[in-house]
Image: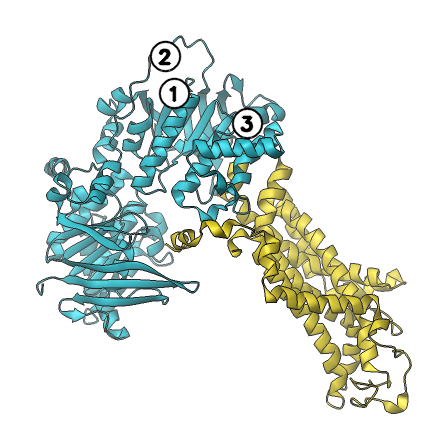
Chain colours: A cyan, B yellow
Amino acid sequence: MSDQVLSFEDLTVDFEVGGTTHRAVDKVSFGVQPGEVLAVVGESGSGKSVTALAALGLLPSNASVGGRISFGGDDVLSMSRSELTTLRGRRIAMIFQDPVGALDPVFTIGAQLVEMIRTHQPALSRGEARERALELLRMVEIPETRFKYYPHQLSGGQCQRVMIAIAVACDPELLIADEPTTALDVTVQQEVLDVLLAMRSKISGSIMIITHDMGVVADVADRVVVMRKGAVVETAEVHELFDHPTQPYTQALLDAVPRGGLRAEAPADSASDTAPALSIEDLVVEYRGRRGRTVRAVDHVDLVLNPGEITGLVGESGSGKSTIGKSVLGLAPITSGEVRVAGQALTKASSADVRQTRARIGVVFQNPAGSLNPRATIGQSIGEPLAVHRGVRGTELRGRVEELLDSVELPRAWAGRYPHELSGGQRQRVSIARAISLDPDLLIADEPTSALDVSVQATVLELLRSIQDRLHFACLFISHDLAVVDQVCDRVAVMSQGRLIEQGDRESVLRDPQDAYTVRLLAAAPVPDPREQARRRGIRLAG
Amino acid sequence: MTDQVLAQTVDEDVLAGRGVWATVRRRVLFWLPLGVLVVLVLMAVFPQLFTSTDPRACDISASARPSSPGHPFGEDLQGCDIYANVVHGARASLSVGLVCTLIALVIAVLVGTIAGYVGGWADSVLARLTDVFLGFPFLLGAIVVLNSLGKRSVLSVSLVLAVFSWPTLARMVRTTVRATRDAEYVQAAKAMGFPIRRILTHYVLPNAIGPVLAVATLTVGGVIVAESTLTFLGLGLRAPSISWGLQLATAQSRFQQAPHTLIYPGIFLAATVLSLITLGDVLRDAVNPKGRS
């Protein structure tokens, strides 16, 4: 035990929320060994982040901690404020989820690095600190010329690498990374993880990485701790865990990871003489940026959705995939080109016609917490499209709302609840119920599951698919997650920088990609298989 | 994290009967200010119920006499009974405060919502207009307007005060409306093709109005005092009228010699404002589903 860098023994953390105490961490014991990468996995609310924050003494004031946390033999919980300050940054460093928010926007990244170095090593002169800072930037593969850049001039991935540089500036014995790549695109995630792993050999310390993504775990971890509802479920070596999970929960978690190929081949479409559910012709969307510059978000895109077909629109952030969805919904300006919904052109139609057309489109947004009116009960939200567009009232409306709740597998009695009383997955079910309330010809789902935990995501996707099987609407499924798209879609379209670079059947695009970008995207998405990840990393580093 | 904790604590039994009324009914902080306000309104409507003394029957020889039998609050500089004055003054003060706030609120919600929701040039024009009113000196404006009006009633004074108090509220409405305009549920409502009027009344305003109402309740107190400033300058309600503001204005110069002339009307003013604020807070919480249960 004593050779462990950091060890938790029977750690319990209680939060007091509005008079009631809630146990966030319940008798957790595990340790980080020298030089290893330990991954702590769990869904939201499993207590993984709270455990890490407790190790740094960073818990909010309404938390009470029990048990023992020892770091290199010292008890962290009994440390004074000044002892904790020297512990943080110097011996334990932390990287947070949102790199852009964690950097100070008014100082250059160079100044922030130098400050960090000089705070913890006051003996260094200004020049020496600057030298060290440049060396650190080189280590995280950021060109020295960026020394004088401000955070907003760097991309998210670069910011996260600067955060890593700041974190390792003082050769910490332990680096804690809390969801370091969750806010980043897959290709960028890969670069950051590569840099993070390279750090391990350079700082000769241990890394504790907190994540919800089994693919990331398979990619970087040596050992894995699985947490659920504040308790440790399983601790195992990574190959062991993926090959022979001993706990049912671990098994369920692994099963919930979308693997694709679950959807049966789309039946060969019988005569496509009906108008396509959605056809986008040569669409260009431009936004007026600052100082009169125009930003072209969507650049001459053609896309056709046939009735009853789910088309996945994949791309990284900023690729324009959401903008396409928005322009169909009338939330983004159509600069040129045409959008037709069931043959009805949107740009030339009268506003009454557009309203009519919109009633035939259902929408599911990414953030289930944000897309429901917080002042309305879920029954009101679900019934509202019916009331507004069809004029359904009274008992008939109540009956329809109950049917819709049934169809998304929520209890009928919940119609009187408010959105904040539901969990994320349940709220997303409500969004789906609202979207299908008018029996739409077209459903636009904009990252419907990316804010949800994997196990919840699996059930929501399952639901979406079964409803689609029943109602046969066409669906534009916008997502950044290739595995999810693989799981639900018939056709796939890949976007990058506003252009549609590849589209076709799911099998042809995902199994036999033609475009170099698609190939890169597929290779970057981590799969929950440590051997496959190790193989890919070997190829990448050799190449 | 906390979201989850909250979600877990809501059980089936909470669902039964938790409308606004059911929530509010159980709270002392609802009944207490409501009681005070009911008494004050009764006072304003039927002052005879509370005192039979004529507030205008004054005995100059009893000038500034502290409380004595028959005159529980004492007498003011003119020797008039302060209790009777406070009771009879409720009508003018409450109506000026409430009418003015109401007018200001209506203008503010209209202007602020248009500026915040439509944005663009409408926002620029309305924002400049608000600035003009904010930049215009209140007293100068009031003097000009009230002098040219000639006749002064509760309504005209309220109107003048409202003209100068809506811009602050309008700015707040604009800010909160802008924040809710970009919320995802508003986008969702637009995407579902709901008419603008419905989006505004069901989505934007209910979610944006909370902070504005809180400030509006504060405005009531401010207006009652502002009326006294006007009266002090001879521009508000004329001396034969009775109002708390008028009493406060006359009392403040002699505060050290006769503190009771200031304290008693002051207590009534404070009680009114405090009750309104507390009631506003409780109602705001109750109307917000998250504050219930």
B172 left or right, relative to B165: left
Q: Front-most of A97 and A235?
A: A235
Mark 2 and mark 3: Cα distance apart in space = 26 Å
Q: Determine the secondary structure under disc 1.
A: loop
Instruction: Tell me if residue A223 can be seen.
Output: no
Instruction: Tell me if residue A41 can be seen.
Output: yes
Number of residues whose C-alpha sits closer than 10 Å to that of mark 3, classed few (under 14), some (14–19) or many (20 or more): many
Q: Is residue A332 above or below residue B184?
A: above
Q: Which residue is mark 2?
A: A269
Mark 1 and mark 3: Cα distance apart in space = 19 Å
Q: Determine the secondary structure under disc 3.
A: loop
Query: Which callout, 1 or 3, points at the residue further toward the start of the chain?
Result: 1
Q: Which residue is mark 1?
A: A309
Q: Which residue is mark 3?
A: A359
Q: Residue at x 28, y 74 (%)?
A: A81
Q: Are marks 2 and 3 in contact (CB under 8 Å)?
A: no
Dots 2 and 1 on the same chain? yes
Residue A459 is tagged as none
Dots 2 and 3 on the same chain? yes
Q: Position of residue B118 (x, y in %)?
A: 61, 42
Dots 1 and 3 on the same chain? yes
